[in-house]
Image: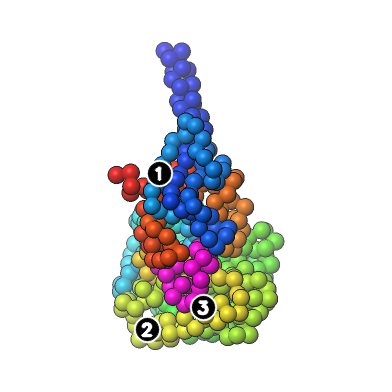
């Protein structure tokens, strides 16, 4: 019996090694590799052990071939601004009450559905910029362990902001409803020292990236959308502490003054940026600060039921988005794709490609924004974002040619992440 189990274990190990060394070839009519601005024809990518072994040329003998026909292969899409542990809900007040009533376990289970929808839409990597109860850490770890399907996640634990501001989860509720006043361990800081502690605490408990709220927000019920909410000293403390620990930083910022303070502090990206003036945009270009405009929120905000103050802020913000992107493009500001998923339905992330092009971004640049440019922002350009030798095998396929019609990015039918096929509608 002992000999049987030994032989069985060796057999299983051999199967695992075989799976890792299996060579797979993905073929298509064309390919956008994320490096250049043109299509490569035909498309052919050779994959083994979860990585790209070669691009172009002929298929190796004995390789498993997946021929996708008249389609375009692209690098796995990247969304630099998501909230996978939060649900989209058209009723603002109802959503806030549900969040109070829902257990952490239920929220965690629901988050796995959001993660799967995102992956199946072709987004193999996301930067998740604010959660609660370590839901983002748990989801990331479960995806990494292969327990649930989902995109590769960089997580923030809890976004950092000021008392009563956009990142204060207790804002808008009566005093005493929560069991304690929000503090640094809840992401609420009121000094440079608290800022440093909060950054270190977040990283201690799993943060890959540090997110801060430099201004008011659209959906927060107690602040003006464009007002600065953190001092220069607090922002500098956040960025310095994060960078010292080799973490990138992102700042939610609608107003120009708050964004300017964050850029001067060395922030890596400005999220939303709705009311940025030309001075701040020029500063971003000079500093190399990325803009993540999150245009897709309009698809959820337009239909949502909001209290009067929130509706007023939402309408003002939506009216300014297009002008922001056009001015940022004209000034040469680096733009990465991010959607603010949860403010609109999860899985609709590719709408962002369409909206960026509608605002004047060249189609190839929009595709870069959601692949190689976003990978650079996330600090993962050596691993993902392009189809080239040695990169992780994250690939998606869309029908037709996205350079002719960017809307085909909303029709992903093939998804591979780390060499594993999660979706192939043409195999049915």
Q: Position of residue 191 (x, y in %)?
A: 63, 75
Query: Eyeballing the image, is 111 above or below 24?
Result: below
Depth check, front residue: 407 or 122: 407
SS label for mark 2: helix
Query: Eyeballing the image, is 152 above or below 18?
Result: below
Q: Residue furthest front?
A: 41
Residue 311 marker: 2
Depth check, front residue: 263 or 397: 397
- The answer to whether residue 302 is left or right of residue 332 is left
What residue is shown with label 1? Answer: 67
Query: Eyeballing the image, is 30 above or below 320?
Result: above
Q: Earlier in the sequence, mark 2 or mark 1?
A: 1
Identified at 49% across, 76% down, the residue is 360
SS label for mark 1: strand
Q: Position of residue 155 (x, y in %)?
A: 52, 59
Measured in 3D between alpha carbons, the distance from the residue under mark 2 to the one under mark 3, in whole angstroms, is 22 Å
């Amino acid at each position: 019996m002992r000999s049987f189990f030994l032989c069985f274990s060796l057999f299983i190990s051999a199967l695992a090694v075989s799976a890792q060394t299996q060579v797979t070839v993905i073929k298509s009519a064309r390919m956008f590799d994320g490096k250049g601005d043109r299509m490569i024809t035909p498309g052919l990518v050779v994959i083994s052990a979860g990585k790209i072994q070669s691009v172009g040329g002929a298929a190796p003998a004995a390789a498993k071939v997946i021929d996708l026909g008249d389609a375009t292969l692209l690098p796995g899409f990247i969304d630099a601004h998501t909230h996978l542990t939060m649900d989209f809900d058209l009723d603002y007040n109802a959503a806030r009450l549900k969040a109070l009533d829902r257990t952490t376990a239920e929220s965690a289970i629901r988050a796995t559905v959001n993660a799967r929808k995102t992956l199946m839409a072709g987004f193999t990597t996301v930067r998740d910029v604010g959660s609660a109860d370590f839901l983002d850490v748990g989801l990331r770890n479960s995806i990494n362990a292969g327990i649930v399907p989902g995109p590769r996640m960089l997580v923030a634990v809890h976004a950092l902001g000021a008392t009563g501001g956009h990142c204060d989860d207790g804002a808008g509720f009566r005093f005493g409803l929560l069991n304690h006043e929000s503090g640094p361990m809840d992401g609420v800081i009121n000094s440079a020292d608290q800022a440093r502690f909060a950054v270190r605490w977040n990283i201690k408990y799993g943060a890959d990236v540090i997110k801060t709220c430099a201004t008011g927000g659209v959906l927060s019920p107690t602040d003006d959308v464009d007002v600065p909410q953190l001092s220069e000293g607090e922002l500098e403390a956040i960025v310095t502490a994060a960078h010292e620990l080799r973490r990138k930083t992102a700042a939610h910022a609608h107003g120009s003054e708050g964004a300017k303070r964050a850029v001067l502090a060395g922030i890596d990206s400005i999220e939303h940026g709705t009311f940025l003036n030309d001075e701040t945009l020029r500063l971003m270009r000079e500093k190399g600060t990325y803009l993540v405009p999150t245009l897709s929120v309009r698809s959820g905000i337009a239909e949502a039921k909001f209290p009067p103050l929130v509706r007023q802020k939402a309408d003002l913000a939506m009216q300014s988005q297009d002008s922001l992107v056009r001015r940022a493009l004209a000034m040469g500001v680096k733009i990465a794709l991010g959607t603010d998923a949860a403010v609109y339905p999860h899985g609709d992330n590719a709408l962002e490609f369409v909206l960026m092009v509608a605002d004047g971004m060249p189609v190839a640049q929009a595709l870069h924004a959601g692949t190689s440019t976003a990978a650079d922002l996330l600090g993962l350009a050596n691993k993902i974002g392009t189809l080239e030798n040695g990169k992780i095998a994250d690939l998606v396929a869309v029908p037709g040619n996205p350079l002719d019609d960017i809307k085909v990015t909303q029709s992903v039918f093939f998804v591979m992440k780390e060499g594993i096929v999660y979706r192939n509608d043409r195999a049915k």
